Structure formats: structure tokens, C-alpha cells
Image (cartoon, coloured by chain):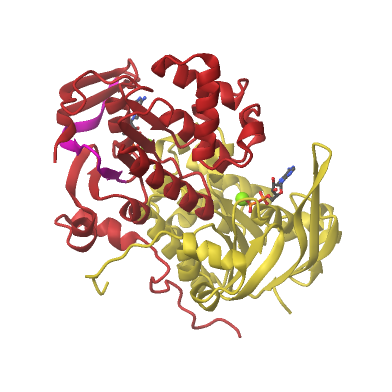
Chain colours: A yellow, B red
Amino acid sequence: MSLLAVSNLTKHYRRGGKTVIAVDDVSFHIEPGETLALAGPSGSGKSTIARLVLRLIEPDAGAIEFEDNDFLALGGAALRARRARLQTVFQDPLAAFNPRATVAHVLDDPLRIHGIASRSERPHRIAALLERVGLAADLAPRAIHEISGGQRQRVAIARAIATKPSLIVLDEAVSALDVSVRGQILDLLLDLQRQERIAYLFISHDLGVVRAVSHRVILLDAGRIAESGDARAVIDAPQSAIGKALVAAAPRLKRTTQDAS
Amino acid sequence: MSALASIRDLTVTYRRDGNAVAALRNISLDIVAGERLAIIGESGSGKSTLALAIAGLLPASSAVAGRIEWSGLGRTPLLGRDIGFVFQDPSASLDPVMTIGKQIAEVARTHLGLTWSQAYAKAKTLLERVRLPDPDSALHAFPHQLSGGQKQRVAIAAAIAAGPKLLIADEATSALDTIVQAEIVALIRRLVAEDGMTLLFISHDIALAAELAERIAVFRHGQLVELGATAQIVDAPTQAYTRTLLDAHIGLDAAPLLNRAGLPA
Ligand SMILES: Nc1ncnc2c1ncn2[C@@H]1O[C@H](COP(=O)(O)OP(=O)(O)O)[C@@H](O)[C@H]1O
Ligand SMILES: Nc1ncnc2c1ncn2[C@@H]1O[C@H](COP(=O)(O)OP(=O)(O)O)[C@@H](O)[C@H]1O
Ligand SMILES: [Mg+2]
Ligand SMILES: [Mg+2]
């Protein structure tokens, strides 16, 4: 059984009297420890799929099976328990917090809400989580507005892994980071995947990054799957019109002398 | 190679919460008339501060030392007339309650001394030049009726309306998706060539900058790390930091970071 199986997912929006088909009959699956990327132009439905999978919004049609449960049928305590297994990190994930909130507070929430650790255990858990994402434990009392963008993204990842998820939805999670920091965050994500067998639904408009970190890719165009398959095979030789356009538009750095590194 | 502008020992300090933040330190560089010069660097490196200093847009909370000489212009530049400025967020430069035609016409009227009807005719020509679909109806449209890429086309039309010598684009394509970004970069390249403008292209994306610019200046922590021809910066950087930026780029030909072992088939 797949970790996540999405079938015939459809989502419409009504806007100014017109109907926008944000997601149109989309089906895919993700295996444990796998990275599936969603790529496509802006407005192609990537974030809507992410929100549907996270059950932040409800589809008009389709089914979502997660860890062998009919995810759309879950409610109440069962849904809450299953949600611990399905986490998310997006572009500026700590923006929703009061900037004066501390790192410890941000990490305490999931541990408390999901009953993962008692009050007395939590400081130790928080220290361990910080260490797991490559941060010093003494960052805990700092306010999130005092730490750097890269550190904030590590805290967001720590928050996501606090509940031991099997799947993390990453919606443009590395897009706003400086390139030097981005490489470190990608390394951290891949390391977590290897250690904990976490699967990722990796959403990015950057095909270079998608190709480097994903097993498979789905290219979306106007809410529909235009093309899918092995990430390198698809991006190296796209067949769909949108795939060709995306590859043609990606900026290229033409270096003639290049380090082996 | 005559300089449009010569920047000498430019230091810009912002005051915030009683602290002084040195955003630019002792920057000296020439902007060559007619060139496409890229300014690259990571966030906070001072790129926007340099753009604002050149455009005369620094906030009152800043202290400036050093000078900018406009030998290629022969006068103190006026924003709008001599310098066109395109920001990352087109909404920042477009008035949400004014029609697109009027916004562009106003620039032409103010700086070129045209009548309203001449200015509107000019606005229509500009909307055609930036390849906005259906320029006639776009004249009467409001910014919110356009997509992000279309708004950026309008912002570019307004920026070049008075025929400036220098066009500054500060992360002008960073909020757009890859396909729209490539279209806007192609548009900027064409307009700069057609009008003989000098381009200051500011970007955090070294690959994008290298595709468009003839010279690249690398900034870090408010300092100019390295300045050279694009081929030299990309192929033979003299500074370790430039090499770090180049190596951090993940292109379509990058080695996969992913270790595929261990994944179930
Ligand atoms: N809450 C909403 N109300 C109306 N339209 C929406 C809403 N969310 C998304 N859309 C529309 O659905 C389409 C897909 O959007 P989105 O999933 O955000 O795309 P992407 O993440 O690929 O940029 C777009 O046309 C968008 O305008
Ligand atoms: N208005 C301002 N007030 C105080 N500090 C500022 C202001 N604008 C920028 N800075 C600071 O100046 C430095 C350079 O910023 P900026 O020029 O915006 O860099 P970049 O465009 O390369 O990201 C940063 O440390 C930034 O926080
Ligand atoms: Mg999105
Ligand atoms: Mg900037």
C-alpha cells in the first residue's frame, strides 16, 4: 500500500461569477521515504493540492488515502491523531507566530497538542529537536524575530518532525532562502528522510532543485497533470508543452571551468 | 567606455532603534554608459540600498558619505526622467485606484511636457512595446485586473515612459514564476537595446544575472567583493565568496543531492 494515494482530486473555486478549476482530476501516490515533486507555473494548482492533502480545504471530488485510512472520512480525535503523521513546512512558516514568541514556544505547541511529552519532559525534547535540525539548544529562549531566516526554517522543520510524521508537505519551503542556506536546508531534509524514512511532497517552481532532490515529479498545468515520471528523466527530456516551456525558461549558468565538487 | 555614473567611496548607514546599520561600505564603481550591469548578492548584502542611493530614494533615516558623479548625464538625475525604477512588487509603484493608462500618461506628461491626449497616445504605444495583450482596453483597466507578470509589464512601461538613460530593475522578476520571469527578462533586454538605455539589474540569482548582464558586481555584507565581465565572474572568479555563490547554484545539470539507495521500488 502507498503511504498516500490521491485519486481523481478536483477542486473548484468561484470567483467573480466565474468558476476556476484549481485542481482537475489529479491522481498520484507517494511511497514511504519517497520525494514526489509538484512543479508548474504559478496558478497551476500546486498549493491547492498541498492544502487538500493537508485537509485545510475539502475537495469537490476525489479520494485521499493516507496510511491506509480514508483520510477525508476522518474527524475529531482520529483526524487529530492522523494529522500528527502529516506535517507541513511552507515558505515563511513562522510568519503566523507572534515575532516575540520564543523558539521553545514554537516547538512546545506540537508536543503539547499531540500529547507527545509531559510538561517536565518537554524542555529535553525541545533541546533534542533543535539538535536534530542542527541548531544549538541555547537557541530555545530566543525570540523568532531575533534568529536568521535559515535558523527559522530549521525551527519550522523541527516543529514539523516533532510529531514523528511519515509525510511532510513542503510548499516552496526553500524558495525564499539564500542559496548558501538553501543547500544546507536541503541537506538536512534529505538527511531526515534517510534517517526517519520521511516522505516529502516537494512543491517548487525551481526545476533545478526539483531535479536534484526528488525521486519523481508531476508537472502541473492549469490544475491538470501534464506529465509525470522519474524526476531526472522528465526534466532532462520533457514531453509536454508546459514541461518544455519550464525547462526552456530555467536560467542556466554556463560555466566552462567547473570544480569537481 | 565612458561612465554614465561614477560611484566613489559610497557608505550608507541606516539608523534603527538607536543602532547604526552599515548597509554599504566604501563602494566605488563605474556604471558604463549603455552597459548591462548586474548587482548580485545574498539578502542583506546592500543591493537595494545601492539602487536606492543611485535613484536618490534613500529614506531620511539613512546617513550617506561619498559621492555619485553623473558625468555621462551632465546634470543631477531626476527619478522618472533620467532614471526608471522597477521594483520586485509592481503594486509598490502602481496606484491601485488609477487606470493604467493614466499612470503611464502622467509620467510622460510630467517629464516630456506632453498634453494629456499626447501622453495617452504615448501610453498606448508603451503598452504595445511591453507587449501587454489588448493595449486599448488595458489603458482603462486597473492594476488589480492584471496578473503579476502583466502588472510588471505596466510598471516597466511607466519606468521607461520618459525615456530614461538608466533603468534600474531591483529583483523585478523574483516574485514571478520561471516562465514569466524569462519573458520579463527578454522584455527588459529588448527595451534596453531599442532605447540604448543603461541597465542596472539587481538579483540574488547569479544564473539569471549572468544570462542578462555584460558585467557582474558581487556584493556581500555591504561590500563590493568582485566586479568583472560576466564570463570572468562565472568562469574565473578571483574571490572565494563568488565561487561559493556559483557552487551553490543548483542548475538543471546539477548532480543529484539525493541518494536513491534504500527507496522501495
Ligand atoms: N481561495 C481561493 N479562491 C479563489 N481562487 C483560488 C483560491 N486559491 C487558489 N485559487 C486559484 O486556483 C488556482 C490554483 O492556485 P494555486 O493552487 O495557489 O496555484 P500555485 O500554488 O500552483 O501557484 C489559481 O487560479 C488560483 O487563483
Ligand atoms: N530602511 C532601513 N532601515 C534600517 N535598516 C535597513 C533599511 N533598509 C535596509 N536595511 C538594512 O541594510 C542592509 C542592506 O539591506 P538591503 O540593501 O535591503 O540588502 P539587499 O537588497 O541586498 O537584500 C541589511 O542589513 C538591512 O537589514
Ligand atoms: Mg503556490
Ligand atoms: Mg533587496
The answer to whether one can see residue B54 in this image is yes
Residue displayed at 47% across by 57% down: A128
Residue A83 vs residue B124, the one in the foreground: B124
Residue displayed at 49% across by 56% down: A129
Instruction: Kindly indicate the quadrant of the structure image that contains residue A245.
Output: bottom right
Residue displayed at 21% across by 21% down: B64
Residue A181 vs residue A86, the one in the foreground: A181
The answer to whether one can see residue A200 in this image is no
Q: Which part of the image, by quadrant, shows the N terminus of chain B?
A: top left
Residue A104 vs B90, above or below: the answer is below
Query: Is A146 situated left or right of B143 in this image?
Result: left
Residue displayed at 23% across by 18% down: B76
Q: Which part of the image, by quadrant, shows the C terminus of chain B?
A: bottom right
The stretch drawn in magenta includes residue B39: yes
Residue A36 vs B81, above or below: the answer is below
Residue A33 vs residue B188, the one in the foreground: B188
- Magenta segment range? B19-41
